[in-house]
Amino acid sequence: MLKNRSCSWCDSTGITEKGFCCMCKGKGYMEVIDQAVFAAKQQPNLSCLIRAISKHTTPEQFSNIMNDC
C-alpha cells in the first residue's frame, strides 16, 4: 500500500467498493497507477506492470482497476 495513508475512507488507494473515493477524489488511485508506471519503466513488461499494481492494492481494488482497463 501507499506510504502516506491520509484518507481513512479508502486507505489512500482512491478506490472504494462502489468506485472512486468521494473524500480524496481518487487521488490515491492515481498514485498507485504512477507507482506502477514507474515500476514498469524500470522493467518494461506488461506482467511487471500488473504485478506492481497488485502489490500496492487489495484484491478487491486490483479487480476494480483491472475492470477499468
Image (cartoon, rainbow, N blue to C red):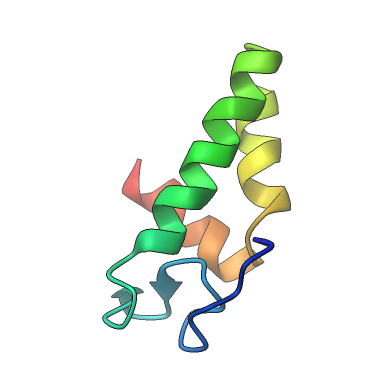
- Going 59% across and 27% down the picture, which residue do you hit? 38
Residue 49 figure quarter: top right
Residue 63 x, y percent position in the rendering: 51, 58
Provide residue 17's location: percent of width, then percent of height. 42, 80
Q: Is residue 28 above or below residue 51?
A: below
With 37 as the anchor, is 14 left or right in this view? Answer: left
Q: Identify whether 2 is placed above or below 55.
A: below
Q: Is residue 32 above or below residue 10?
A: above
Residue placed at 65% from the left, 61% from the top? 2
* Closer-to-camera residue (43/31): 31
Q: Quadrant of the N terminus?
A: bottom right
Q: Residue at left 31%, top 83%?
A: 23
Asked if residue 46 shows in the view, the reply is no
Location of residue 56 by image quarter: bottom right
Relative to 55, residue 17 above or below: below
Where does the C terminus fall, quadrant-wise?
top left
Can I make out residue 28 in this image?
Answer: yes
Q: Residue at x 53, y 50 (%)?
A: 32
Farthest residue to the bottom: give it.
8
Would residue 2 appear left or right of 12 to someone viewing this image? right
Q: Is residue 22 left or right of residue 12?
A: left
Please state the horizontal and vertical placement of residue 6, each as a whole percent of the image. Answer: 53, 78
Q: Position of residue 10 (x, y in %)?
A: 48, 80
* Residue found at the very far top of the displayed protein: 44
Number of numbered callouts drawn:
0
